[in-house]
Image (cartoon, coloured by chain):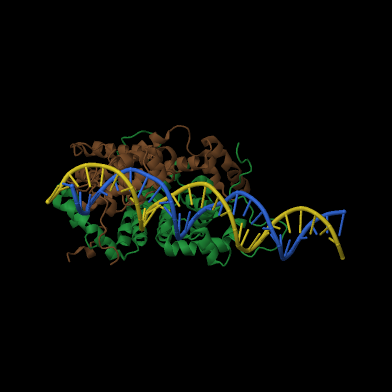
Chain colours: A brown, B green, C yellow, D blue
Amino acid sequence: MADAEYVNIWMRPERPARGPKPAYSRTQITEAALRIADAEGLEAATMRRIAAEIGAGAMSLYRYIPGRDDLIELMADRLMGEIDVAGLPSGDWRADLRRYADGLRGMWLRHPWIATVNRSIHSYGPNQVRLIERVMGVLDPLVSIDENLDLLAMLTGYVESTAREEVGLVQEVRRSGLSEAEWLARGYPRIRQLLDSGDYPIFSKMVNQARGPHLSRDEQFRYGLERVLDRIAAGLPAPAGPLADDREHGPR
Amino acid sequence: MADAEYVNIWMRPERPARGPKPAYSRTQITEAALRIADAEGLEAATMRRIAAEIGAGAMSLYRYIPGRDDLIELMADRLMGEIDVAGLPSGDWRADLRRYADGLRGMWLRHPWIATVNRSIHSYGPNQVRLIERVMGVLDPLVSIDENLDLLAMLTGYVESTAREEVGLVQEVRRSGLSEAEWLARGYPRIRQLLDSGDYPIFSKMVNQARGPHLSRDEQFRYGLERVLDRIAAGLPAPAGPLADDREHGPR
DNA sequence: CGAGAACCGCGTACACTGTACCCAGTGGAG
DNA sequence: CTCCACTGGGTACAGTGTACGCGGTTCTCG
């Protein structure tokens, strides 16, 4: 029973009733932090730096935001708002899910730092909730709520894990301060060592032969995406009875 | 052309030729850091804390490790070594991949902090490379290298994205310093607010009805895993051909 | 065997982080 | 008018990663 008066950032009103007019605003601060994080990574978005960006003193930010973690939640939810799902249950579920997936991927590539933030149900902001509502609405008339969750987890998992891989590289290149070519070159000796050892024939094949020049990353993503959508289309998995034997399916 | 003499941690020998005998070792330091990270999270594993754990001065660690980032790479690779893939191309590809997936998931659940570290090809340590070699060896005789990569990306993506979700909660609960129940309770007002607004009927349905009590998380994982394996079994995707892959339910 | 170099553990110091606390000033409520 | 809740923000503090340099130890080589 430490701090009983804790409240989530989404329930904490931005402006109280009385007093002088604030000079800044939550969205202004969030936007400034976003600009810095996009340009130089999340760790560059320090409180002092953000404050400087909007011409404020460092401690002024705390009049608007309880702490840095909450600010990051605000930023993350701002990003969810970038995914365009207006009018989403359109009737064509496949087109709808494709649009969601493309939007999610685009957002990740635009804001690589999102890979480093943990999101839990507590941090669901208005944009995140609206996104869930819209996207789950797509399959809601067709499947049970549990199946809906499973299928969307599969879809989102696909998009995020592919994006995470791409974005991880971008992050690390930036952190090194080198150009991408220089950064790659820096790793060659190690790779060479592994290849020359002769102990890893399949790994060698992967490095040397894989990823022929025939498909760009976007094309690969799209192809894989269609296969995930195929998987969804392939028909709902066994209705409510799970696997082969439905012995533990009895109602409790 | 800043620091031309940079070398990867994996190419940097632990001990030079001459001089007095070191009192500690890389593995000892890595193990200590691991213990702290497992117990209190990665951010608790500071250089001073690790040094104290093994009874050394903070700066002594830098005789063994270039910096904290490299130490984290050592830790991550140590974790990869926990995944048991001995004698892995056994002939039964399905059993092999299941074993890999179970091992990967187990490792994640044992070391939740792995969710916060970015791994790129440059950081592949010996255990990671050996893991790749073994696991890719499973499907290598059956499919092309590109298909192999795609299929394993799907499998690994499934395991990691489900584990990431579970583990994210654990992380956040710990960071709050509360019990899991208290932490959950802290979020209720917000959820209640969303539900009471009436604007999110599907979200409400999700919160109220989803995840019936019939399946534990492990069971859910295993069920989903079998479906991913089914997908792999379903036959190789159309070669380089575009979409419209109308093969749905392959032979079972 | 003795000298010098290479290495050891580690104390001090620095730049930087998030943020607690405090201040003087401001402007709406009574 | 008087309150006083609020404002922006300066100072301060604990804690971070780590550069630098010290005196002591141990190996190599003449």
Q: Which of A161 and B90 is in front in this view?
A: A161
Q: Determine the image quadrant of residue A164.
A: top left
Q: In this view, does B14 lie to the left or right of A35?
A: right
Look at 24% across and 38% down and name the residue there: A85
Quadrant in the picture for residue B107: bottom left
Answer above or below: position of A251 versus B121: below
- Residue drawn 27% across the image and 44% down it: A232
Q: Position of residue B180 (x, y in %)?
A: 30, 64
**Count of picture labels:** 0
Name the residue nearer the viewer: B162 or D30: D30
- Quadrant location, the C terminus of chain A: bottom left
Q: Give the left or right position of residue B13, taking residue A79 as reference.
A: right
- Quadrant in which the N terminus of chain A appears: bottom left
Residue B96: tell me if it is visible: no
Horizontal and vertical percent for residue B29?
56, 62
Q: Is residue B252 above or below residue A110?
A: below
Asked if one can make out residue B29 in the rendered structure from this viewpoint, the answer is yes
Measured as percent of width and height from the top left, residue B247 is found at 31, 41
Residue A189, located in which quarter of the rendered image? top right
Q: Which of C29 and B54 is in front in this view?
A: C29
